[in-house]
Image (cartoon, rainbow, N blue to C red):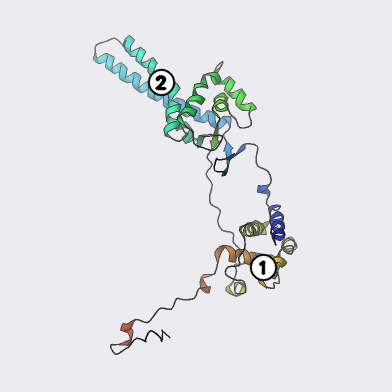
Amino acid sequence: MAGNRAHLARRSSALSAEEAEPLDTTADVETPEHVRFRYRTAGPARRAAAYVIDLIVRTVIISIFAFLALIGGATLGEDGIGGVGIGLLLTLYFLVEWFYYVVSETLMGGRSLGKRAMRLRVVKQSGVPLSFSDSLLRNLLRGADLLPNFYVVGMIVMGRDRYFRRLGDMVAGTLVVSEESSRVREPLMIHPPPTAKELSRIPARPGLGADEVEALELFVGRFGQLSPARQEELADLVAPTFADRLGLRYRSAARFLGLLYFRATRGVLPEERQPVRRPPNLGDHGPGFQPPSPGQGWP
């Protein structure tokens, strides 16, 4: 029986082109709890766009403080910002330039405002969230990536790395991944829809294993891409196994597998459900009605 399950899984998996090979821009991460995730790593273009957004945010922050310093100098009767104001602005520029990313990535779960806008996130290569020390290390090495100017070193290193990591990412052991939004796939539909008469011969709980249900789902999902003759040819390889197990007969092997998948995933049709009988209301029988004794029960 286990061999038949494995054979069904192999045959159905071969039909799914999406399961063939992952793209080279994806990273498989296994957490310490042995849970595997697949991330799509962020390329230089999206990271550059996020950097431009963060650059605008930093510029706005520094400009606001420069404007406040100018107003403060004018209030005190000084000409311009003054030496003290310039010193404070330079200190602010240093703090914003070097700690903007550290603070935002630590407080926002590995994201800055630019990364959030571009749906990017920094994670550890082990799958755990980014820590303060990790963010500090990867951003302190930003100075090396800037050399000689405009992130030339960083772009060269990213272009030669499979996961588009810059020097800071390599040293800190981090990845910048893309948080792609995905829609939940709608349940597979069987055409024509199953009828109560067809389903009456199949048990409501056929007792299939998880691997068998997954293999049936892969097969049913290809109904619209295969010719009827090809569907029957593939279904005839495994349908007799299920039919013998359940003691059933069928005319179309593909239709039989589709009905079996429907039973395993959705149970019964609404018209198959029997109304629940309830004891009659005592008030419906008038004041002279006597309920049955405990040994009698309701009719």
Q: Identify the residue shown where x is 26% and y is 14%.
A: 74
**SS at mark 2 in the image:** helix
Query: Is 222 located above or below residue 147 in the figure?
Result: below
Q: Furthest-front residue in view?
A: 295
Say above or below: 148 vs 121.
Answer: above
Report the disc number at residue 181: none
Question: Picture coordinates of residue 242 (x, y %)?
Answer: 68, 66
Residue 150 in view (yes/no)? no
User: Which class describes the residues within 10 Å of circle 2: few (<14), some (14-19), or many (20+)?
Assistant: few
**Residue carrying label 2:** 95
Residue 278 horizontal/vertical position (percent): 40, 78
* Amino acid carrying mark 1 in the image: Phe
Q: Which mark is residue 256?
A: 1
Q: Is residue 103 above or below residue 88?
A: below
Left or right, 93 with reference to 159: left
Question: Front-most of 208 and 143?
Answer: 208
